[in-house]
Structure formats: structure tokens, C-alpha cells
Amino acid sequence: MRIAVTLGDPAGIGPEVALAAISALAPDQQRQLLVFGDEAPLRRAAETLGVAVPTLALHGQGLGDAAVPGQPDERAGRASVAYLEDAVAALRDGRAAGLVTAPISKTWARRAGFAFPGHTELLAERLGAAPVAMMFAGARLHVALATVHVPLAEVSARLSAARVRDVTGLLAASLRRDFGVARPRLGVVGLNPHAGEGGLLGREELEVIAPAIEEARAAHGAACTIEGPLVPDAAFRDAAGGTFDGLVAMYHDQALIPVKLLDFEDAVNVTLGLPVVRTSPDHGTAYDLAGRGRARARSMQRALQLAFEMVARRAG
């Protein structure tokens, strides 16, 4: 089954890391790709990297032809949105079973009419999926997020027992189905320092997270183990040491700081809860590196490799 790849913002490093990652694949895997993007950004990336553009099933509209590496604008933002929408159409009509997305700029995509906080929310709406969650998979950590792109001051209000329960269930299911963990060991971290210290430092652990864990155990306890609410700083150390197969974090930076510290070049963003596989690198558009040949493609390579592995596992 084919995998769709989007080039992301053509003014960013997306074309470069995508081309580098695709070039590292075996020819038979390259033939399984549907690449959504324009030829001109790929040609520029090839010149920068000093490689040839492999023969690909390339789908573009010419919207990114005028993009200048390192100089984002609304045209580049519009192109990145078009690439994504075309790839989603391929998922919906069955031409692809997986999607790997190079990074877009939320700022420039929004100026071009993109009405979503990010890829995850658009994919959930277009594919009719709910609930969904963002998970980062690295060599040492697998972390799912209960809240994502919200201001820190709003995190507590956005948390609910239902949300934490659902994300825990999605993480357990993905670790079994996509990563081959027969009985995942999950940890759910607290929101507050010391996991609230019995209510002294916050009551979210008592009123939201602990009830969510009990609900998740009732629903999924036969197929996994779930511990928590865990003291956050110790939980990430323990997970990196192998105590847990996956963690549920309460907010964006709580998860991303340890992931990027330990697994920056190997971490992959995985969308949980979709009817198809979706992965992406764990970095952004890096306009300051675009066109210089200095962007590291390791995370994009891992995203492609993981997409192939997940699609194969789901196919049985």
C-alpha cells in the first residue's frame, strides 16, 4: 500500500529533508510513495544537497515554484496547504494508507486560509476521527499529549478525566498495534510539581487525573498496566530507563522538552486515533537553515521508516 509524502512549506527545509529521506530509501520503497509537492522546490533541494531527484509519483500544482528558501510568504503558505489537502484526498479515496508530512508554518499557512491549529486537527476533521492525540516516538521515549497547542495558563481548564482517559487508551492501542508491545506499561504524569503533593500544590491530580486513570484501567486494564499520577520529573527519567513503554503528558512542553533532549534526531510525531497512519519529523520549518544544505534529515528519515513499519503491521 502506498504512502503519501508532503513537502511542507517550500520556503523551509521540508523539500530538503524530504528529498534526503526519500533518496535513502530502497528503490522499491520509493515506488510506493505518492509525493505531494512541486518539482521546482525539489530541484532546488537537489542542487543544494548535490543529489539527483529520483523518479517519483509527484503531484503538484506549481504553487511552490516561486518559493525562495528562507523567505516565507503567503504563496509558500498556500502551497503547503494545497500539498496537504491533496494528500488527504489520496487518503480518503484509498490511494494511500499512510501519510508523512514535512513541516509547515502555522503562521504562513494561517495567512493563506488554514483554519486549524496544525496537521492533527485538520486530519481529524477531514478523516472523521475522534478522539485523536499527538504522540512522540523516539528511541528512549514514547509520549502522548493530553493537551497540545494551548497557552500554559489554559491547560488546567482544558484537562478533563475523559480526555486523559481517551489519550491513555489511544497510546495503549498504538503501542500494541503499531509498535508490537504485547502488554504496554503506561505511566500517566501529574500536572503539578510532585504530582500535586496530595492537593497541597494543586488538585488536578486528585480531581481529574486519578479518576481518568481508574476509568482507563477499567476499559483497558486487561491489555496494559497503567500507573499514576506520577511525579513528572521522575517519570520521564524512569521511562527513559525502561520502566514504562509510554507516558501520557499533560501539556506540550512537559512532553517535548525531555523528548527533544533525549531523542531529538530520532523522534517522530505520530497522530493517534486516525484510520490511517500519519507521521512527521519532530522539528519545524527552520527557515534559517533552508537552502544551505545544513538541515539534518534524520527525523524525516525515521518518520518515513516508521510509516512503512506501521502500515505493514496494520496490514497484518
Image (cartoon, rainbow, N blue to C red):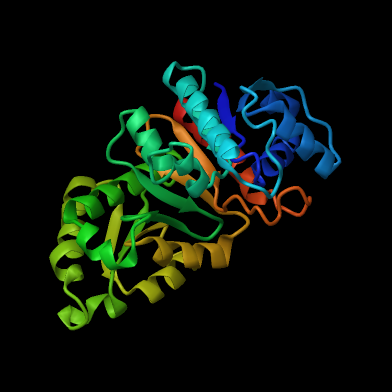
Q: Along the line of sight, which residue is nearer the eye, 258 or 216? A: 258
Q: Residue at x 56, y 27 (%)?
A: 3
Q: Along the line of sight, which residue is nearer the eye, 20 or 294? A: 294
Number of on-image labels? 0
User: Which residue is situated farthest in the bottom direction here?
Assistant: 200
x, y percent for residue 291: 76, 47
184 in relation to 23, above or below:
below
Q: Residue at x 57, y 53 (%)?
A: 283
User: Which residue is situated farthest in the right direction here?
Assistant: 50
Q: Along the line of sight, which residue is nearer the eye, 189 or 314? A: 189
x, y percent for residue 225: 29, 56
Q: Residue at x 56, y 56 (%)?
A: 139
271 in relation to 253, above or below:
above
Residue 121: which quarter of the image?
top left
Q: From the viewer's perspective, is 144 left or right of 179?
A: left
Residue 69: which quarter of the image?
top right
The reply to whether residue 68 is in sight is yes
The reply to whether residue 8 is in sight is no
Q: From the viewer's perspective, is 147 left or right of 21?
A: left
x, y percent for residue 131: 28, 40
Quadrant where the image shows the N terminus: top right
Q: Along the line of sight, which residue is nearer the eye, 155 or 170? A: 155
